[in-house]
Image: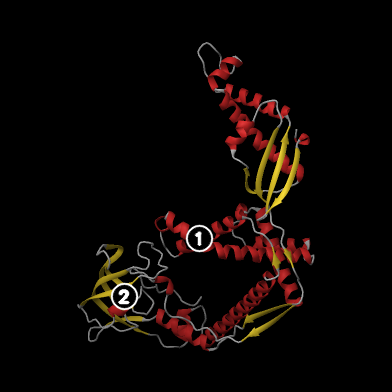
Amino acid sequence: MSSTLTVSTSPLPGSRLAIEVGVPGGRCQASYEAAIKKLGLTVKLAGFRQGKVPRPVLLQQLGAMRVKATALEELVESVLKDALAQEQLKALGQPELSGGFDSLLAQFEPGKELLLKLEMDIPPTPTLKTTKGLKAEAEEVQFDPARVDELLEQSRKQLATLVPISDRAAAIGDVAVVSFSGVFSDTDEPISGGSAESLEVELEVGRMIPGFVEGIVGLTLGAETEVNCQFPSDYPDETCRGRGASFKISLNDLKAKELPSLDDAFAQQASDKETLAELRTELETRLKVDAEKRQKINREQALLKALVAELEVEIPESLIKEEVNTMLQETAAEMSRQGMDINKLFTPELVRNLASKSREEATERLRGSLALQALAKAEAIAVEDLVLEAKLKEVIRGLSDTNRIDHARLRAAVAEDLLKEAVFSWLEENATIKISKNIPEKVSSADESSKKPAAKAKGKAKPID
């Protein structure tokens, strides 16, 4: 039947396509007859065996419009599938009927030709104004030897022995055991999860929400205070975000950190190394490798930015929505890894806000991906089968559970990564990158991800593995 379809197409803005399909009357009639037969199997009438109800009685029982609607639903689905195959078209998302189903139903008559008019998103066709001679600028990432000392100092703090303190007030760097309860400043309503008894808190700026740690500093044992805080505007719990809060805090216990000596015994406690010299060497090597990786990322991002500037493409709405959904899933996974309750936090309003804010980034991510695809096509950059097979075997060897591998998806992912590497290698050879000086990053001792009233102190696991 698909060979008898008459199909015409015309491009629309936004990488969409308008399709008109002429469906022969015979196919319309066949769909109608099939609908009667299908629905007839569901009708039970006294005096008739199921499936043997006479046609006039059956039509009266079902109703002509129900039969036609069922026939048209099946017809549209099958015709669209055949038309796409006939014209070798790929649809993104679900094609839409122009004028809607009810309008088409009013036109549908068994035995008469039917004209289907649809619109659908199609894969975009990205092109580049130019590929060679691109100019990019990337920030330099330098290895800073001082970071080795900073990491060692962090590790000493994590492995510190806690010594009870009773003769002075709480200070930054101490560990306090506090009881607290909080209310919102604007309503005096208790904060859900904003109270605790005997919670251990490391007194470091940035450890809790702004103002909380600062309120504890200066307290003596048994003392109480009331502090005003402000929840960050990006706080995970939507009910708290950006609101002022008042916390009543009492200091139950206070401990100071007694740092271990920086020697071979510390190295053995903090890592699998026998000597402090070996630990320093490993940290230096690790930081150098990290600096090289980040420098590579900076170069690739700079090259991609320059390439995207040459991109000409219309991105369909369905692709943008799909990318936004991917980003929302990534956000949810990251929040879940931090121990947050996704079911509670991801309210419909939050999802809508995140989707709206993610749209621009999603579009830029798509533009980057499409620019790389366009370059690979324009310059005939490809991955050889032997290289792909070798890499695939290497990846599989590194997997713990090979029985649950989706080989088709894994192969596609590995091929995509290899092609991306090949494209960036080509860009490195055919573009000019200016490296700008950058101030080396410092290691932050504050845990920025724990800005919540109920944040707990970190454990005593080996900090350097």
Query: Along the line of sight, which residue is nearer the eye, 161 or 343?
Result: 343
Image spot of residue 173 (x, y percent): 35, 83
SS under mark 1:
helix
Front one among 447 and 461: 447
Residue at position x 65%, y 26% from top?
32
In the image, taking residue 46 as reference, residue 291 lies left or right, namely right
Residue name at image x 51 percent, y 78 percent:
272
Residue position marked by numbered label 2 in the rendering:
212
Instruction: Judge whether 85 appears above or below 46 on screen.
Output: below
Name the quarter where the N terminus is drawn: top right
- Amino acid at dot 2: Phe
Which residue corresponds to the image point at 60% horizontal and 36% vertical from the top-left? 103
Residue at image position (69%, 47%) is 18
Residue 191 versus residue 121 in the image, above or below: below
Quarter of the figure with residue 423:
bottom right
Q: Which of 447 and 37 lies nearest the eye of the viewer?
A: 37
Q: Is residue 325 visible?
A: yes
Question: What kind of element bears circle 2?
Answer: helix
> At label 1, which amino acid type do we have?
Ser
Residue 82 falls in image quadrant = top right
> Going from the N terminus, do you reach mark 1 or mark 2 first?
2
- Residue 154: percent from left, percent from top: 44, 82
Q: Residues within 10 Å of mark 1 (few under 14, many from 20)?
A: few
Give the total number of marks visible in the rendering.
2
- Residue under numbered circle 1: 356
